[in-house]
């Protein structure tokens, strides 16, 4: 398979205060197979959404998350390229997707990537161009395999920030899992949607972690995940409030209390009994 060109664009994490998934986790992981690929139910159909020409991977991850969450609720809606450019413009106001490197287009100084947490904070306050406003978001500890697996089981995805090595570019072209390479230089920060884990007995997460990047599904080895994952997040959308796995795995009272303690605002939803 011939792979198309691709870009990165995730800025280094800001590490501002945020809700913690570990605090709102009930400790009950919903019933799920020991190996799962939540992305497989989508049957492909992922779009590049500009990440072949611009560093909009964070905005693309937003679109991919919205597709997965709305599909799970039975009403799939996949934000289009115009919506992704609008999200990208929230941190790159001078970027012109139709311009060139000389006119504030792709490759120019206006094509400056995005910070994941800054986008999540904005989405909670203002919503996205699709009209959907998340209720909250929480950080997942990427160094805790059990926490990552629980988050995947409950939400169906983890929004993940990684550092790509040059060797991973060759692995992607060869359709191989991304592994950690001690002597390979870093190529850039990247944002992806992780949505699965592999068979048992192959590592602390059960095997390779499945993710979407550049419109393709591929995987990380556990060595890569342990070395090159900078940040991981879950996002609470209104669709989750009707999902049995979410209601079983999340302590809504703690979530609401922590949200108020962090933001000074009331949690923006009636919590189900």
Image (cartoon, rainbow, N blue to C red):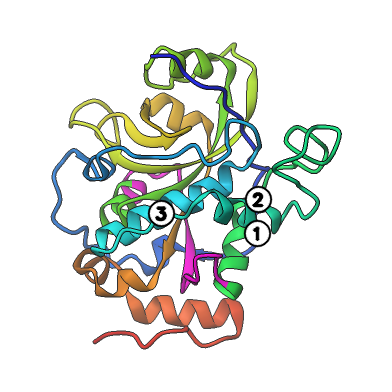
Quarter of the figure that contains the C terminus: bottom left
- How far apart in space, not on screen, are marks 3 and 1 (Cα)? 22 Å
Q: Secondary structure at mark 3?
A: loop
Q: Give how far across and how far down residue 108 sits, in percent.
A: 80, 35
- How far apart in space, not on screen, are marks 1 and 2 (Cα)? 5 Å
First in residue order: circle 3 vs circle 1:
3
Examine the rendered structure and indicate whether residue 226 appears above or below residue 92: above
Examine the rendered structure and indicate whether residue 134 appears above or below residue 230: below
For label 3, the crowd category at 10 Å Cα-Cα, with few meaning under 14, some 14 to 19 and many 20 or more, is many
The image quadrant of residue 53 is: top right
Residue tagged by mark 3? 78
The image quadrant of residue 55 is: top right
Residue 88 sits inside the magenta stretch = no
Q: Relative to the observer, which residue lies in front, 143 or 41? A: 41
Residue numbers of the magenta segment: 127-148
Residue tagged by mark 2? 115
Residue at 22% x, 64% y: name it: 245
Q: Are marks 1 and 2 in contact (CB under 8 Å)?
A: yes
Q: Relative to the observer, which residue lies in front, 41 or 136? A: 41
Tell me: 185 left or right of 208.
right
Tell me: 85 left or right of 269.
right
Q: Give how far across and how far down residue 125 sits, in percent.
A: 60, 75
Examine the rendered structure and indicate whether residue 256 appears above or below residue 227: below
Q: Give how far across and how far down residue 47 sits, in percent.
A: 44, 39
- How far apart in space, not on screen, are marks 2 and 3 (Cα)? 22 Å
Tell me: 67 left or right of 6.
left
Residue at 49% x, 51% y: name it: 80
Q: Secondary structure at mark 1?
A: helix
Q: Are marks 3 and 1 in contact (CB under 8 Å)?
A: no
Q: Relative to the observer, which residue lies in front, 265 or 258? A: 265
Residue tagged by mark 1? 118
Quarter of the figure that contains the N terminus: top left
């Amino acid at each position: 398979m011939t792979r198309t060109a691709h870009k990165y664009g995730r800025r280094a994490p800001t590490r501002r205060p945020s809700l913690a998934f570990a605090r709102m986790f009930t400790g009950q992981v919903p019933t799920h197979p020991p190996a799962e690929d939540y992305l497989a139910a989508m049957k492909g159909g992922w779009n590049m959404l500009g990440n072949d020409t611009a560093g909009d991977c964070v905005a693309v991850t937003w679109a991919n998350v919205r597709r997965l969450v709305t599909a799970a609720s039975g009403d799939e809606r996949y934000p289009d390229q115009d919506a992704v450019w609008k999200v990208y413009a929230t941190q790159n106001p001078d970027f012109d997707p139709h311009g060139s490197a000389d006119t504030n287009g792709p490759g120019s100084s206006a094509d400056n990537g995005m910070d994941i947490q800054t986008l999540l904070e904005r989405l909670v306050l203002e919503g996205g161009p699709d009209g959907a406003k998340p209720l909250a978001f929480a950080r997942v500890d990427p160094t805790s395999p059990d926490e990552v697996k629980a988050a995947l089981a409950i939400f169906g995805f983890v929004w993940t920030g990684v550092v790509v090595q040059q060797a991973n570019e060759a692995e992607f072209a060869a359709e191989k899992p991304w592994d950690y390479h001690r002597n390979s230089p870093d190529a850039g920060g990247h944002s992806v949607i992780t949505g699965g884990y592999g068979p048992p007995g192959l590592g602390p997460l059960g095997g390779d972690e499945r993710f979407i990047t550049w419109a393709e599904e591929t995987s990380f080895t556990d060595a890569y995940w342990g070395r090159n994952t900078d940040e991981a997040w879950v996002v609470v959308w209104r669709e989750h409030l009707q999902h049995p796995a979410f209601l079983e795995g999340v302590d809504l009272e703690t979530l609401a209390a922590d949200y108020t303690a962090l933001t000074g605002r009331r949690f923006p939803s009636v919590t189900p009994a």
